[in-house]
Amino acid sequence: MNTQMLKGKIVEAGTTQEAIADAIGMNRCTFYRKMKRKGNTFTVEEMNNIVKAIPLSKDEAINIFFRT
């Protein structure tokens, strides 16, 4: 997972990691912890929720979550 690209898309969307964590119903500390671990512990459901919350296009999601 490309956490730097995800962080960039969050900023581009004019929001914050805290707001995304809240939007997907995840504790902010948990969100930060998962990001710190290079996103490797996000579940598919969590990834889908992040895609909807930002929002991301299909290509952006693939580039962030499935390419290194």
Image (tube, rainbow, N blue to C red):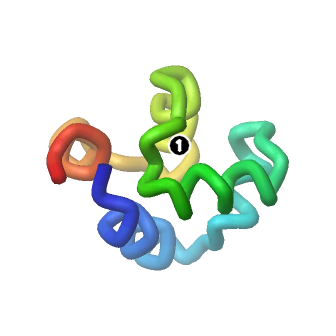
- Helix, strand or loop for disc 1: helix
Query: Does residue 11 appear to the left or right of 15 in the view shown?
Result: left
Query: Does residue 53 appear to the left or right of 6 in the view shown?
Result: right
Q: Nearer the viewer, residue 54 or 68?
A: 68
Query: Does residue 14 appear to the left or right of 40 in the view shown?
Result: right
Name, please, the residue furthest toward the front: 37
Q: Residue at x 45, y 70 (%)?
A: 7
Q: Is residue 68 above or below residue 13?
A: above
Q: Position of residue 61 (x, y in %)?
A: 29, 43
Query: Does residue 59 appear to the left or right of 33 in the view shown?
Result: left
Q: Is residue 63 above or below residue 14?
A: above
Q: Position of residue 29 (x, y in %)?
A: 80, 58
Q: Nearer the viewer, residue 68 or 5?
A: 68
Crowd class of label 1 (few under 14; some 14 to 19; many from 20; radius 10 Å): many
Q: Is residue 16 above or below residue 2?
A: below
Q: Which residue is mark 1?
A: 50
The residue type indicated by label 1 comes to Ile
The quadrant in which residue 18 appears is bottom right
Q: Residue at x 52, y 37 (%)?
A: 41
Q: Residue at x 73, y 46 (%)?
A: 23
Q: Position of residue 15 (x, y in %)?
A: 61, 71
Q: Residue at x 38, y 74 (%)?
A: 8
Name, please, the residue furthest toward the top: 45
Circle count: 1
Q: Nearer the viewer, residue 33 or 3?
A: 33
Q: Position of residue 26 (x, y in %)?
A: 77, 42
